[in-house]
Amino acid sequence: MGKLTTSESVSRGHADKICDQISDAILDALLIGDPNSKVAVETLVKDNMVVIAGEVTTKAIIDYKKIVKEVVSDVGYSLEHGFHPSSISIINLIGEQSPEINNAVIMENEEIGSGDQGFMVSMATNETDNYMPLEIHMAKKIIDSIIEIDGLGPDIKSQVTTEEIDGHKRIHTILVSTFHSKNMRLEDVRKTIINHIKYGECKLSEDIMNMIDGETKFIINPSGAWDKQAGPVGDAGVTGRKIVVDQMGSACPVGGGGFSGKDFSKIDRSGAYLARYIAKNIVSSGLVPKCVVEISYMIGVPEPSSINIETFGRFKNDLLLTDIVKKIFPMTPKQIVDHFDMRRPIYLDTARNGHFGRTGLPWERMDKVNDILSAIYLSES
């Protein structure tokens, strides 16, 4: 047996992901009313109860309950499942941000100090067409596809295990657990999902589909029928608890904290986006097949306290690459915010559909490739 690697994903109907969506929907609403809003909002759900808490500094006035109910409605549970906009109770514990923290963030000359200390890690790899690790890429694709099948979801979990032998990967195991309609028999659920994946309905690339072979294991709803309790009725949810799912799965170390409910000044969010942006541009330039970027910040200080680029020996001088990155990429919170235009209401979409590996997200652009290659050429001439 070769090396086994596993990553998982969850759907927007999972209790933790519902919390992420509520927190980011509140952030978006505040940014619409005041693009300079400072926001740190957490959500807890259980049964038909939603608790929102945190701190904000904003000029915006929003209807918190309306926002919560809109998210709950979009998730798609019916009234009989006990988590429905017409039946939920909402507790609002959101207050004003600490003036000490606010003073550290708002600086002279319109600079933004880091909203917290911490280190952020992200990566890129050329093993998939969106530069995501294979296992998390597949797990997400499977979720995105299955949730569109009538009678399945909205609470779904997937897990993909690959086996690597002599540098070549194959799909070892695909696991899916999904809530389903009472009108669907368990054997029909299993057959539907297996056929859906095998016959290419998940829109995986041909290269990835070729990694699924006759020995690939398909494990669907191993605990049996799941048609009674799901989402917050079956399990409590909390914002930020799916941080590995939100990032690169098991392929990359995880730094910082959760993303959702945090505005652009919270460097554990914007810093992680920056790390991904740097790594993706390095890999897409063709210099290396894989790159991991780690950046750290200190609260109230704009410049990063450290940056480390790891190419696993595939580039001749990682220190040179680090120096180049410092010169051509945005590094301070204000530079990051301006470069990615992060004062816009773009965050609910990331909580619902993923933070990385999708077109349309500014940190997924590959617009620094020529700058990187030019800088390397000049350093060698």
Image: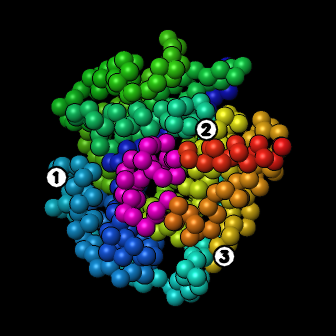
Question: Is residue 242 part of the magenta span, yes or no?
Answer: no
Q: CA distance from mark 1 to mark 2?
A: 47 Å
Vertical position of residue 63 compared to residue 362: above or below: below
Instruction: Name which of mark 1 and mark 2 comes first in the sequence.
Output: 1
Q: Position of residue 265 (x, y in %)?
A: 53, 71
| Amino acid, disc 1 | Leu
Q: Position of residue 375 (x, y in %)?
A: 73, 48
Instruction: Name which of mark 2 and mark 3 comes first in the sequence.
Output: 2
Q: Quadrant of residue 49?
A: bottom left
Q: Which mark is residue 172?
A: none
Q: Which mark is residue 79?
A: 1
Colour treatment of the image: rainbow
Q: CA distance from mark 2 to mark 3?
A: 31 Å
Q: Are marks 2 and 3 in contact (CB under 8 Å)?
A: no
Please give left or right for residue 106 compared with residue 309 in the image: left
Residue mark closest to the camera, 1 vs 2 = 2
Please tell me whether mark 1 sits on a helix, a strand or a loop. helix
State which region is magenta.
340-365
Q: Which mark is residue 284?
A: 2
Residue mark closest to the camera, 3 vs 1 = 3
Considering the image in quadrants, where does the C terminus appear? top right
| Amino acid, disc 2 | Ser
Please give left or right for residue 20 compared with residue 65 in the image: right
Q: Position of residue 17 (x, y in %)?
A: 39, 53
Instruction: Name which of mark 3 and mark 1 comes first in the sequence.
Output: 1
Which residue is at 22% across, 34% downward? Answer: 151
| Amino acid, disc 3 | Val
The residue at which mark 3 appears reads as 301
**Is 206 or 88 nearer to us in this picture?**
206
Please tell me whether mark 3 sits on a helix, a strand or a loop. loop
Which residue is at 58% across, 77% downward? Answer: 111
Q: Position of residue 57 (x, y in %)?
A: 43, 81
